[in-house]
Image (cartoon, rainbow, N blue to C red):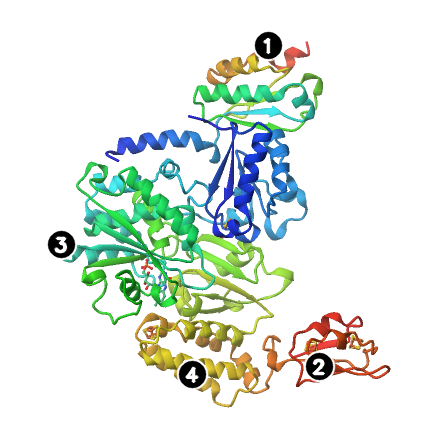
Amino acid sequence: MKSLAELEEIRKKTLEQISLRKSNDGMRVIVGMATCGIAAGARPVMTAFVEELNKRNMTDVTVTMTGCIGVCRLEPIVEVIDKDGNKTTYVKMTPEKAVRIVAEHIVNGRVCADYTIGEADK
Amino acid sequence: MQLYRSHVLVCGGTGCTSSNSEKIIAEFDVQLARNNLQNEVKIVKTGCFGLCAEGPIIVVYPEGAMYTMVKVEDVKEITEEHLLKGRIVKRLLLSSGHDAKDADEASSSLENSEFFKRQMRVALRNCGIINPEQIDEYIAYDGYKALGKALTELKPADVIEILKKSGLRGRGGGGFPTGLKWDFAAKQPEGKKYVCCNADEGDPGAFMDRSVLEGDPHSLIEAMAIAAYAIGSDQGYVYVRAEYPIAVKRLQIAIEQAKEYGLLGKNIFGTDFNFDLEIRLGAGAFVCGEETALMTSVEGHRGEPRPRPPFPAVKGLWDKPTILNNVETYANVPVIILKGAEWFTSIGTEKSKGTKVFAVGGNINNTGLVEVPMGTTLREVVYDIGGGIPKGKKFKAAQTGGPSGGCIPASHLDTPIDYDSLIQLGSMMGSGGLIVMDEDSCMVDIAKFFLEFTVEESCGKCPPCRIGTKRMLEVLERITEGKGEEGDIEKLEILAKNIKASALCGLGQTAPNPVLSTLRYFKDEYMAHVVDKKCPAGVCKSMMKYVIDADACKSCGICAKQCPVSAISGEKKVPYVIDQDKCIKCGVCMEKCPFKAIFKNV
Ligand SMILES: Cc1cc2nc3c(=O)[nH]c(=O)nc-3n(C[C@H](O)[C@H](O)[C@H](O)COP(=O)(O)O)c2cc1C
Ligand code: SF4
Ligand code: SF4
Ligand code: SF4
Ligand code: FES
Ligand code: FES
């Protein structure tokens, strides 16, 4: 170890990897993973979220799962909760949609309105 | 770099390792692979969470769900339900201690459980959070930043000044101010000096130092390097008992990693400060925890105490100025350097700053490690954090300070615990063992237990300790066997006074404490043994009898068949009787009698 800067670099890099062990107030992505969700293809959707966030180094976003949300016909369902607690529910998700949600909603804060539950019921 | 969406922390402390956590880790690897989750979920082996009695402990992040008493068979369910489908396995959750009314009240997050909520983790800050075998994880939580700061921004005298201001006192027993100790050593003429760590942890029932070594070994390395910088040393030794194989291995790994990163060795942080660290294994004799004996042992001789002065700060290892501190003392140092003396002094009481780790055991629901601010009351530790006494029994006393300490009776449950209040109560902080005793404990028997320990561990160098403690034990044995004589209590008091005044080292000087303190608070119990030949708690076997109630006995003969020494005789229609001379008081007959006709007579 030659300098504090070098130490700081290791600190930052590792903290990113383990930050999910600290309670954090960043955005949360919740994937419905009950039986119907999994049958409808929730797993590839979740994997897509994890990979996409990984690519972008977005460590303050946590991806978790939940049980049945109750609208099985619209599965896979994903909820995105932002820092202020606002919830957006996306339905009939696909891995492709997940990539766009990361880019637009999570990175830039613009809700992808065409994927949301309100849109699907129109 | 690989990011995972979930981390599964599996406790790899000694407690959980012995309850099979290694196998659980292996099973997770299998189950994760089966469900194709190995790139999403990471398994991390950590140090002790402090709840060993509930082990093996597993915590799943990001939810922070804490699973307790996990069996290898449960891993499949955790994987398929929680990790795959996101449904927390409720039946394995830590119940929120004594007041868990139903399963739904069980806390799903470890931060919310009574056990953790009331604690304040400074020395144990990383235990159960980082992987102790990965230096990067320690660095992620500000590890080695304090060393960096000390070397690049502070002069050695500044470091000592911060320590002095912080009011940090030794956590290994005596409570000597750490900054002052360092200052003595720093003021010695320049030349070879040594930094030592006492990880002997001989107090029966104590395991906080082991937990730091197992869960956060780098904090010790960092602190010792800071100490070396402060006093002008370049060589350190950690004296660990060989009975701590996991701790030794983790420390070894940590030292190697620190060397690889140049955090040990030459020109640390590009300065001209050099520091090396070696482990010395102790054979686990209690007396080797005493500072002069420890140093003699590090030098490779038989661990026997020597008279002080000269104090180690002047003449220690190989007659060079040496400082010796306890593991927990060191674990506080990096945080103090980073957060400042003022932050530290804001915690605790007037003369005892910061926190203290206690290993809570005995008759208590949550046995384990707790770290609380100094000044926390015994009641909070026993009832709020410890979950109270099992089976609704009453609290009788708590023993602190192990074989050198004493007991605190129920009337002092609300005394804030710190160094000075414990001394006033006739006990001491010691290293932090805290053994809770319920109403069924016999205080004379407890005193005997600790004295047996000291007699066994006395090194034999000086007569007051070698012979005096043996004499005291003989008196106690007599009393507990119902053969106590008038004047025995006075005899104990005189012996105690003389041993305390004339023994050479701390072991002998403190050995009478458990007897003196039980005499102080429970003299009536001693009297009952000596005068009435009764053990009120029904513990001392020779004073207790098993008797058959002639009216209740149905002469079934079951007890006579079960008695291992054929002490019971009788025949049909006549009540059975126990021959007290033959009876060995095993209690089997009482347990087996279908008519509850056999009683313990105290
Ligand atoms: C018989 C005896 C046993 C001791 N055992 C230990 C021990 O296991 N661990 C420890 O840290 N200190 C132990 N001590 C206290 C040490 O002598 C010494 O005071 C302490 O390690 C200094 O560190 P501290 O100032 O950080 O507490 C023991 C003392 C005596 C008299
Ligand atoms: S007091 Fe006991 S342990 Fe200490 S030197 Fe004397 S005999 Fe040995
Ligand atoms: S088992 Fe109970 S009832 Fe039967 S003989 Fe013994 S004391 Fe009497
Ligand atoms: S206590 Fe044990 S030894 Fe004594 S009478 Fe009962 S069974 Fe026999
Ligand atoms: S060893 Fe696992 S909680 Fe202590
Ligand atoms: S080994 Fe049990 S608290 Fe750590």
| Chain letter for mark 4 | B
- Name which residue type carries label 1: Asp
Closest to the camera, between mark 1 and mark 3, is 3
- Name which residue type carries label 4: Arg
**Tag 4, which secondary structure?**
helix
Residues behind callouts 1 and 3 on a single chain: no
Closest to the camera, between mark 1 and mark 2, is 2
Q: CA distance from mark 2 to mark 3?
A: 75 Å
- Residue B382, given in percent of the width and then of the height, sits at 53, 59
Residues behind callouts 1 and 2 on a single chain: no
Q: CA distance from mark 2 to mark 4?
A: 34 Å
Left or right placement of residue A73 versus residue B485 in this view? right
Whether residue A102 appears in this view of the structure is: yes
Q: Is mark 2 within 8 Å of ligand 4?
A: yes
What residue is pinned by disc 2? B567
For label 4, count other residues whose C-alpha is less than 10 Å away and answer few (under 14), some (14-19) or many (20+): some
| Chain letter for mark 1 | A
What residue is pinned by disc 1? A114
Q: Earlier in the sequence, mark 4 or mark 3?
A: 3
Residue B309 is labelled as none
What residue is pinned by disc 3? B190
Going by the picture, which residue comes out furthest to the right? B573
Left or right placement of residue B251 versus residue B308 in this view? right
